C-alpha cells in the first residue's frame, strides 16, 4: 500500500491564525490527493480533492497545493469550527490510503 | 439531498457473525460506487473495499480480502458489510461512503454517520 505521512501530528493554534499542514506520499501520487476534516464523533468531511480543488460548500479559507509527493493544506484565518483533525488521502492507486491525521487544537 | 444512513451500534462476541447496513437516499444508487472505511485509534482510517451496486462488482483491500463481504441490494438502495466470524480486532467504527471519480480525480463525497462495532468476550 502507498504510505502517507503527515506533519505535524498535532498543533496548537488560535482563532485567526494561518495554519499549514503537510502531507507526504510515498511513492509518487501525481495530484490524486484529498483532504478531509473530522470532528469528534462525526464522519470525515471532504474538503479538497485533486490536491487543490475545493469541494462544494467548503469555505474559501481552506486551500490545498502540491503535486507528486508533497502536499499542503492551509487554513487562512482559523475559525472556532475549524478545530478538528485533518487527514490527507491518496487516490492514485487502490487501495486508497489515508495519512495518520493532524489534530488542530 | 444525498444521505447515507447506517445501522446502529453492535456488541458481539468473538466468533459471532454480523451484517451492518448503509441505506442511501437522494441519488441513483446503481450509478456510484459505495466504499467501506474502518477507523481505529491504532490504525486510523483504512479503506476496506468497494462495491458497484449496479452489478455488485466488488474490490477489497488486499489486507482484508476474505475476512469481510461487501454486498448491495438494489431493491432497497442499501449496501452491507458482513463478517462470518468476528474477532476482537474487528472492533472499530465503520463508515460507508459514496465514491465518485472522473478524469484525473476521485473522491469520497458523502459519508454515513458510522456504525460502532465492539467485539469482546
Image (cartoon, rainbow, N blue to C red):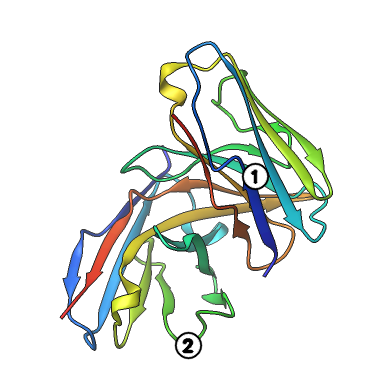
Specify the quadrant that holds the N terminus of chain B: top left
Q: Which residue lies furthest to the top in this view?
A: A16
Decide which of B68, A99 is in the foreground and name it.
A99
Question: Are the residues at dot 1 and dot 2 in contact (C-beta closer than 8 Å)?
Answer: no
Q: In this view, does A103 lie above or below A59?
A: below
Is residue B86 something that shows in the picture?
yes
Helix, strand or loop status at disc 1: strand
Q: What residue sits right under mark 1 in the picture?
A: A34
The crowding category of the residue bearing disc 2, from other C-alpha atoms within 10 Å (few below 14, some 14 to 19, many at least 20), is few
The crowding category of the residue bearing disc 1, from other C-alpha atoms within 10 Å (few below 14, some 14 to 19, many at least 20), is many
Helix, strand or loop status at disc 2: loop
Q: Residue B66 carries which label?
A: 2
Q: In this view, does A36 lie above or below A19?
A: below
Relative side of B105 to B34, left or right: right
Q: Which residue is drawn at 42% across and 75% down?
A: B71
Decide which of B44, B104 is in the foreground and name it.
B44
Is residue B52 something that shows in the picture?
no
Amino acid at each position: 500500500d502507498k504510505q502517507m505521512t503527515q506533519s505535524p501530528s498535532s498543533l496548537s493554534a488560535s482563532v485567526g491564525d494561518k495554519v499549514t499542514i503537510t502531507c507526504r506520499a510515498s511513492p509518487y501520487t501525481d495530484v490524486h490527493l484529498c483532504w478531509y476534516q473530522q470532528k469528534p464523533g462525526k464522519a470525515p468531511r471532504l474538503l479538497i480533492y485533486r490536491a487543490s480543488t475545493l469541494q462544494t460548500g467548503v469555505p474559501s479559507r481552506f486551500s490545498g497545493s502540491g503535486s507528486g509527493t508533497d502536499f499542503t493544506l492551509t487554513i487562512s484565518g482559523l475559525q472556532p469550527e475549524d478545530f478538528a483533525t485533518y487527514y490527507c488521502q491518496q487516490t492514485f492507486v487502490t487501495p486508497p490510503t489515508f495519512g495518520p491525521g493532524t489534530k488542530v487544537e | 439531498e444525498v444521505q447515507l444512513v447506517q445501522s446502529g451500534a453492535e456488541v458481539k462476541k468473538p466468533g459471532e457473525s454480523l451484517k451492518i447496513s448503509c441505506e442511501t437516499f437522494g441519488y441513483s444508487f446503481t450509478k456510484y460506487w459505495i466504499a467501506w472505511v474502518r477507523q481505529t485509534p491504532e490504525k486510523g482510517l483504512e479503506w476496506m473495499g468497494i462495491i458497484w451496486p449496479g452489478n455488485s462488482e466488488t474490490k477489497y483491500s488486499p489486507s482484508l480480502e476474505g475476512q469481510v463481504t461487501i454486498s448491495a441490494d438494489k431493491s432497497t438502495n442499501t449496501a452491507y458489510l458482513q463478517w462470518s466470524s468476528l474477532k476482537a480486532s474487528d472492533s472499530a467504527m465503520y463508515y460507508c461512503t459514496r465514491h465518485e471519480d472522473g478524469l484525473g480525480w476521485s473522491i469520497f463525497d458523502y459519508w454515513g454517520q458510522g456504525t460502532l462495532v465492539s467485539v469482546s468476550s
